[in-house]
Amino acid sequence: MSERGIRNEKVGEVISQKMEKSIVVRVYRMVKHKRYGKYLKKAHVFVAHDEERKSKIGDQVKIVETRPTSKSKRWKLKEILVVAKERGADV
């Protein structure tokens, strides 16, 4: 049997969970400016599959790359790293 390759993982913050079984995750990365050498914060938005609808807005999550689930979903929720402060008591 062939083994799967290493899948990409990213850590980001949930910014929307209005869709059924989907979340929108914002991932930041630092990019060095070509000319001035200053580091800039760039953001990218990913749509990820959340089967059990466990994550909420503000949670810090880890997503993993997977096969395309829909037109825009190519990522899946792996785990919730940090729960948002607003809902910290009811978890």
Image (cartoon, grey):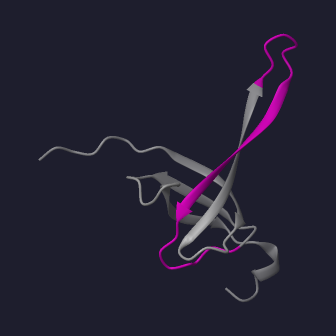
Look at 66% across and 57% down and name the residue there: 25
The residue at 58%/48% (across/down) is: 10
Pinpoint residue 5: horizontal percent, then vertical percent.
31, 41
Q: Is residue 27 above or below residue 35?
A: below
Does residue 71 belong to the magenta stretch? no
Q: Residue placed farthest to the left in the image?
A: 1
Asked whether 33 or 21 is in front, the reply is 21
- Residue positioned 56% across, 69% down in the render: 22
Rendered location of residue 70, percent (x, y)? 45, 60
In the depicted view, which residue is nearer to us: 60 or 68?
68
Q: Is residue 35 above or below residue 80?
A: above
Tell me residue 76's x, y (percent). 48, 60
Q: Which region of the structure is painted magenta?
A: 32-56
Q: Is residue 78 above or below residue 66?
A: below
Total labels drawn: 0
Q: Residue at x 66, y 72 (%)?
A: 17
Q: Residue furthest top?
A: 35
Q: Quadrant of the C terminus?
A: bottom right
Q: Position of residue 75 (x, y in %)?
A: 49, 55
Asked where in the image residue 48 lies, by quadrant, the reply is bottom right
Residue 42 higher or lower than 48, as above or below: above
Whether the magenta-drawn stretch holds residue 51 is answered as yes
Farthest residue in the bottom direction? 90
